[in-house]
Amino acid sequence: MGVATGVTGVTERESGPTLRPMAADAGEVRMGTARGRWVLGTTVLGSGLVMIDGTVVNVALERIGTDLGADFAGLQWTVNAYTLTLASLILLGGSLGDHYGRRRVS
């Protein structure tokens, strides 16, 4: 028989790992429920905020260049540094959400 290895739905057999159906009470989110709509809403809101944030930086580039005395190459570095920082914080947030989000906090 297979041995369960965590909540991922993977069992190990002699022939290697295979996928098996997960239990219905394993924290599944369905769109027909209020929880599913909240998850979708917060995801769309977060994506929208990131898009607006990037747009604000691009609109403010002229003022940033004037205030810092930066040329075109300096503005490119500014956008790249901002984008890299934002991307790494998003990855960190996702990793922390995966690590701590599965636990029940009560």
Image (cartoon, rainbow, N blue to C red):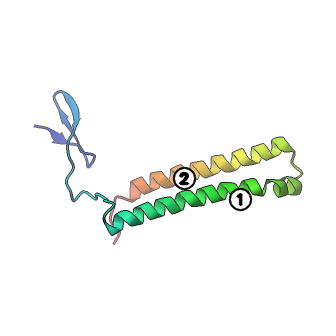
Residue 63: x percent and y percent?
84, 58
Mark 1 or mark 2: which is in front? Answer: 1
Residue name at image x 82 percent, y 56 percent: 64
The residue type indicated by label 1 comes to: Val
Residue 47: x percent and y percent?
54, 56
Question: Which image quadrant is residue 26 in?
Answer: bottom left
Residue, far top: 15
Q: Mark 2 — residue? A: 90
Give the total of numbered labels.
2
SS for callout 1: helix
Residue, far bottom: 106
Residue name at image x 76 percent, y 44 percent: 77
Q: Residues within 10 Å of mark 2 (few under 14, many from 20)?
A: few
Q: Closest to the observer: 93 or 66?
A: 66
Q: Earlier in the sequence, mark 1 or mark 2?
A: 1
SS for callout 2: helix
Residue 27: x percent and y percent?
28, 59
The residue type indicated by label 2 comes to: Ile
Residue 56 is tagged as 1
